[in-house]
Amino acid sequence: METERISATLRAVRLFQPGQPLKQVQMEIPAVGPRDVLVRVKAAGICHSDAHYRAGLSPVRPLPMTLGHEVVGIVEKAGEEVTRLRPGDRVCLHYMVTCGDCLHCNAGNEQFCTTGKIIGKYRDGGYAEYISIPARSAFVLPEAIPFEHGAVMMCSSATSLHALNKARHQPGETVAVFGAGGLGMSAIQLAFARGAASVFAVDIKPGKLELARKFGAVPVDAGAVDAVAEIRRLTQGRGVDVALELIGLPEVMRQAVQSLAVLGRVAIAGLTNKSFEIAPYTELLDREAEVIGVSDHLASEIPFLIQCVLERKLDLSNVVTKTVPLEAEAINQVLDDLSRFGEGVRAVITP
Ligand SMILES: [Zn+2]
Ligand SMILES: [Zn+2]
């Protein structure tokens, strides 16, 4: 395979050792293979997962690694076999780099690609001036979508959409979203974009419930009422067709199952390794209910996301709380805040 190197260097903020602050370095601009594009990064989201990576709670290899999996930018250079993209194109990057060839890729489940690598975790990501990536991972980002919105769209919004798809959400069906944070706000809006009859947003934080209401959801304050009983009451005892668990708490997973209607589906995207309880007869068999796991998302889901943002069905203007420069100190500060306060902090690096 022919590759070409550009002589200049790039600035990147990288993880050298878990538990240590990220460091800023100058490094060589990566090779651009015939089917790759070199993208000048315009925005890179700082995700809660990045705080986990820095803390060593989730594996990153090899080290050092440039973090950043929520990346948008402008094509600087396209490999000689790339026909779909040209220098100057605005693009957003699918964070999973896949082979396109293996059993899972061929079956359309490329999140299980046998050689798949998440950028910013298993290959260099977007906390840098440039990133080299296979052209097939890059999607044209329309001019009307700001770079910052494009960046956050590529992680939490994409996961929310995948959860709705895994739950086989159909127009006219009701949805309960457990967890009205970053994922939840996208899930509520995307459920409506897909024709949800009604959406119930379950959380304990008043601010999140208020925002959920602004997006058209019926807020359910789990701190004040029994969420399951309330959802049953609001649906005349029927329950919901689809429930999404976006928090990662066993007791909430159980509530999500308990809130289901006959033939209802729960999609679980919240992370935990703790077990949760289900009463098989009354909660599953008797309703033919389904519990479904959600892992990452698919490249094929990205065009719908872009469409929703363009049509203003998915409004991400509330999501980005601040922008920071591509500097180690500023980025470490955001990661500190994320570790301390969790969601609610959504910063985007704009190099
Ligand atoms: Zn993310
Ligand atoms: Zn593959």
Image: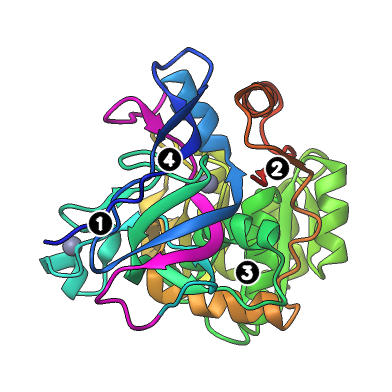
Q: Is mark 1 within 8 Å of ligand 2?
A: no
Q: Earlier in the sequence, mark 2 or mark 1?
A: 1
The secondary structure type at the circle numbered 1 is loop
Residue at numbered disc 1: 4
User: Residue tagged by mark 3?
Assistant: 175
- Determine the residue located farthest toward the top in the rendered image: 20
Q: Which residues are magenta?
A: 57-84
Residue 72 part of the magenta-drawn span? yes
Q: Residue furthest front?
A: 7
Q: Is residue 156 visible?
A: yes
Residue indicated by mark 2: 346
Mark 4 element type:
loop
Quadrant location of the C terminus? top right
Residue 300 in the image: state x and y as whole percent: 40, 76
Q: Earlier in the sequence, mark 3 or mark 4?
A: 3
Looking at the image, tell me whether mark 2 or mark 3 is earlier in sequence order.
Answer: 3
Ligand 2 is found in the corner quadrant, namely bottom left
Distance of mark 4 from mark 2, alpha carbons? 33 Å
Which residue occupies 82% across, 51% down? 209
Q: Is residue 177 above or below residue 239?
A: above
Q: Amino acid at mark 4?
A: Glu
Q: What amino acid is at disc 2? A: Arg
Residue 179 position within the rendered picture, expressed as x and y whole percent measured from the top left: 66, 48
Q: Work out whether residue 219 or residue 208 is closer to the camera in this orientation and state it.
A: 208
